[in-house]
Image: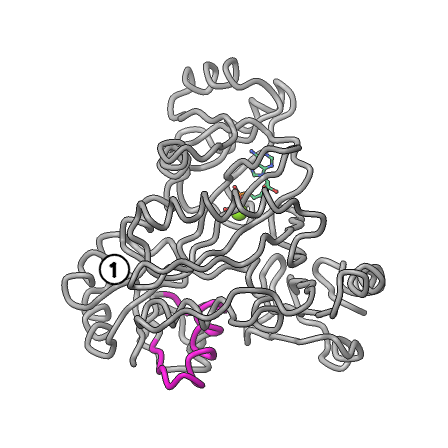
Amino acid sequence: MRVGILGGGQLGRMIALAGYPLGIRCTVLDPTAESSAAQVCDHIRGEFDDFQALYQLAQKSDVVTYEFENVPVESARWLAERVPIFPPPRALEVSQDRLVEKTFFQTLGIPTPPFAAVTERHEFDNALAEIGLPAVLKTRRFGYDGKGQVVIRTRAAAERAWEKLGGRPLILEGFVPFDRELSVLAVRGRDGEIATYPLVENEHRDGILHRSLAPAGDTAEELTERAAEYASRILTELDYVGVLAVEWFQDGPRLLANEMAPRVHNSGHWTIEGAHTSQFENHLRAVCGLPLGRCDPVGWSAMFNFIGNVSPAADVLKFTEAHLHTYGKSPRPARKVGHVTLRAETAEELRDKLPEWSRVFDRPDQGPG
Ligand SMILES: Nc1ncnc2c1ncn2[C@@H]1O[C@H](COP(=O)(O)OP(=O)(O)O)[C@@H](O)[C@H]1O
Ligand SMILES: [Mg+2]
């Protein structure tokens, strides 16, 4: 099988790497010369709206997928007329716009934080009055890693937020005083079969994922089942094929949907060593029409991102439980350049070792030193 991937970041790289043992060859389309994925598989250099490049990708692929949700929907639809493309372009369309996405969740009966559409100044004032403070003002499109959003706690902060973001299509959300953030990854095959990974507990710093624990600790069976059931509503509604990630706020017994990603996800990197089948392999299996692999965990995992720069391998690998992944990206502040997954056999072992792992890996922009 030949799989084309729109986007050449680390997610594309890890999908391509997962393809080799299965005999699946990947080609990425990406505008940058030395993209993370292009270092490990074939590469077509071009913009996502360059139809000549898209045509080349279609020629070289039996099926096309994405590793990045901001691919222009028109490009995905154009490709869909030439080659099977999964997940369906409609999944891109829904997840590219926070207002469309949250409205979609509500249509499916999936709870979300309160939200309102804001474009004009008077809509902002009305939304503030309706939702109250604290709140979060976000751009509807193109936000990632906490970019394009401002938390508003006071009237003065509301003015500053408007100065910064006003004039674009926005969404105002109630700020959720969550107990913790969770995510669920689910995968749906071409035959409609669905498999779901256990809930993951995520810690963000400055809007960027810092650490994931999987399976999430102290999680009621009922919560896990509810997250899986919500995810399966989304998969079924979209006639989805591939891996889907949904991010949640847990507020007491409530599970509120924050956003979804129609692709493999950073909070699923632990599955490479910590689950029977990695998210990357299962995504490929799904889009290629192969049977899905088991999603159950193998032990208990902690994944830490390296933000800014990767720590020296010799320092990371002093931990015999550590698995290091580097993305071949040059160092830059706030950039995801690698991750480490540490795996324990039992929940107790994880609890015992986590403080030491966290002492070493809880260092944004440094990693262990
Ligand atoms: N309504 C909210 N209430 C509380 N925290 C929020 C809210 N929206 C976003 N956040 C915080 O900001 C992070 C990034 O926001 P998110 O909407 O997921 O954007 P991104 O696309 O940048 O990941 C979230 O993971 C969460 O920690
Ligand atoms: Mg997010």
Residue 305 lies, in percent from the top left, at 65, 62
Q: Can the viewer see residue 61 in this picture?
A: yes
Residue 285, above or below 186 = below
Query: Is 13 included in the stretch rendered in magenta?
Result: yes
Quarter of the figure with the C terminus: bottom right
Q: Classify residue 354 as left or right of residue 165.
A: right
| Disc 1 residue lies near ligand 1 with CB under 8 A | no
Quarter of the figure with the N terminus: bottom left
Residue placed most toward the observer, 178 or 139? 178
Residue 49 lies, in percent from the top left, at 25, 60
Question: Residue sitting at 72 percent across and 75 percent down?
Answer: 322
| Residue highlighted by disc 1 | 49
Q: Can the viewer see residue 36 in this picture?
A: no
Residues drawn in magenta: 7-27
Question: Residue sitting at 46 percent across and 61 percent down?
Answer: 264
The secondary structure that most of the magenta stretch takes on is helix
Corner quadrant of residue 41: bottom left
Question: Residue sitting at 39 percent across and 39 percent down?
Answer: 101
Tell me the kind of residue under disc 1: Asp
Question: Residue sitting at 51 percent across and 40 percent down?
Answer: 258
